[in-house]
Amino acid sequence: MTDLAPHELRILLAVGSEGGFTAAAARLGMTQSAVSHSVRMSERRLGAVLFERGRRGAAPTAAGEVALGHARRVLRLLEVMGAEVRGVGAGGGGAGGGGGDPVLAGPLRIAAFRSAALRLLPPALERLTTRHPGIAPEVRIVREVGRGTAGEVLDGRADLGIATIGTTSPVPPELIGGLLLEEGYALVHPAGHPAPRSLPLVDWAENCTSYTRDWWAAQEWLPAATVEAEDDGAVLSMVSSGFGMAVMPELSLIGAPPSVEITDLGADRPTRAVGYVTTPELGRSLAVRALIRELRGGGARV
């Protein structure tokens, strides 16, 4: 099989994102026939149909989705290679080695679930961009359900994901990762309520897929959720207004309003492991390594 060239990967991605050959051609400044020919040649080399053609355009097949993920990751590695080579040169490294530290610059794509994006990332990114002002973080907030943030990394849309990890949500075998923190859950209810456990339970989908499921099933006092909100912010707002109680992780409770009360659930409270995931290749890149250091609380320069 002949390897695909970068321009062929870009054509595949354009067809995938635009949903058709004509729109992809317009975006790339090519003719429709040239785009179609390039895709057919790529399919022949890869030995699989990548797009279902129809009157409404072109949609990736299962094989096509895999190919598009790899295409994004390959093109991103080429971008990182260029940025790091330029950074070494800007840092004063010569043919004989030595010189100054590399200059880190360019976009750094991060996927994070809501509470991590609100609480974990800002101080880490502040330290990162202070040390390396040329880095331009790009943050996407992704619900940690289904494939979640790890799926964004696998699909080549993020360089690093902040994810829930552990035995029930292991790091995918194609990725590498590490623990950042273990957060406990607490009971949250309207401040001053005389019997908070009698209130309706408010929950959200992201919370239901965490490691609390077995713990919840064993709690006779905990009713089934009667209201499911879109995210933890909406849950906290409902509890604050006196609508119900909730069981929430610590990150979601940072900065909670005084109208809510947080009650510890004791030594047997459920916990959630929060960590990072990235690809083995990007895990060796200077910018991703620098971000991981800052997420862990700062450290030596790259």
Image (cartoon, grey):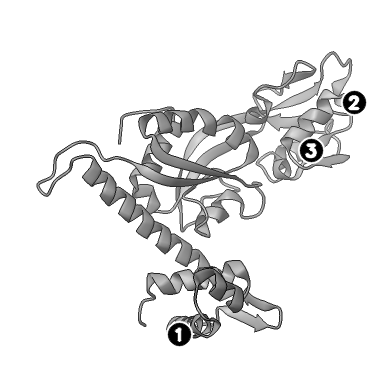
First of labels 1, 2 by sequence position? 1
* Mark 1: amino acid: Met
Q: Residue at x 56, y 73 (%)?
A: 26
174 horizontally vs 185: left or right: left
**What residue would you read off at disc 1?**
41
* Mark 2: amino acid: Ser
Q: Nearer the viewer, residue 203 or 157?
A: 157
Q: Label for residue 198?
A: 2
Q: Where's the N terminus, which quadrant?
A: bottom left
Seen in the picture, residue 46 relative to 187 is either above or below; the reply is below
Task: Identify the secondary structure beneath mark 1.
Answer: helix
Indicate the position of residue 96 as horizontal and vertical percent values: 9, 47
Seen in the picture, residue 39 relative to 149 is either above or below; the reply is below
Image-quadrant location for residue 164: top right
288 horizontally vs 275: left or right: left
Q: Label for residue 203?
A: 3
Q: Where's the C terminus, which quadrant?
A: top left
Residue that lies at the very extreme toward the left in this rendered image: 96
**Disc 1 from disc 2: Cα separation:** 65 Å
Seen in the picture, residue 229 relative to 78 is either above or below; the reply is above
Q: Residue at x 66, y 28 (%)?
A: 268
Closer to the camera: disc 1 or disc 3?
1
Indicate the position of residue 172 as horizontal and vertical percent values: 51, 55
Determine if residue 164 is in view.
no
